[in-house]
Amino acid sequence: MKTLKQLLAEKTAPLAVVSPHESVFHALEVMATHNVGAVLVMDGEQLVGIFSERDYARRLILLGKSSKETLVREAMSDRVACVTLQHSLDECMALMSDKRFRHLPVIDEGHIIGVISIGDLVKEIIASQKITIAHLERYISG
C-alpha cells in the first residue's frame, strides 16, 4: 500500500481554501470549482477550521440561514483533526471512521500540505487489495 506522502503526491489540484470572513456562498463556489466536499478555512497561514457540505446542511439549511449572508466562521467546524506524513493510511482511515468525518488535513513542519478524503483512502485500499489478489492468484496457479 502507498504511503500518505505518495498518495498526496498524486493529488495535483491546488488546495481549496477560504477565509473565515468570507460568505458561505463563496465557500460553496470554491467547493464547486475544485469539485470537493470541503474547504480549509485559513486565517492567513493558520488553519482555523474546515467547512464541508455537512456543515452547510446542518448549520445553514436546517436552520433556515442564508448562504450569502452567513460568514464561514459561523458555520465551519473549528475543531479540526490533522495528521502528519508519519501517519499510515490505515491510521488515517481509523481516525476518519472513528470521528465520522470525510476530510483530513495533512501537516508537515507546521504547514498544511494537503487534504485527503475518505474517498482517496477507499480507492487506495481497493487498488492495494486488487494487487494482493493478483499476486495470490499468480502464486496459486504457479
Image (cartoon, rainbow, N blue to C red):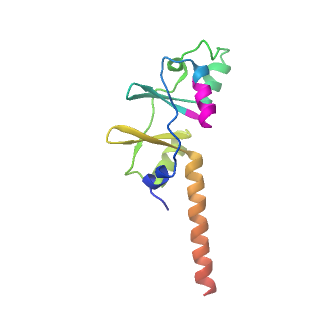
| The stretch drawn in magenta includes residue 67 | no
Residue 102 picture location, percent across and down:
56, 40
**53 and 68: which is toward the camera:** 68
Which residues make up the magenta segment?
A: 27-38
Using the image, determine if residue 138 lies above or below residue 73: below
The residue at the far top in this view is 69
Q: Give the prevailing secondary structure in the magenta stretch.
A: helix
Using the image, determine if residue 137 lies above or below residue 55: below
- What residue is rendered at 59% in x and 53% in y? 122
Using the image, determine if residue 139 lies above or below residue 113: below
Name the quarter where the C terminus is drawn: bottom right
The total number of labels drawn is 0
Residue 59 picture location, percent across and down:
60, 21
Residue 7 picture location, percent across and down:
49, 53
- What residue is rendered at 39% in x and 49% in y? 85
- What residue is rendered at 39% in x and 25% in y? 44
Q: Is residue 33 left or right of residue 76?
A: right
Quadrant of the rendered image containing residue 32: top right
The residue at the far left in this view is 109
Q: Is residue 107 left or right of residue 93?
A: left
- What residue is rendered at 62% in x and 15% in y? 68
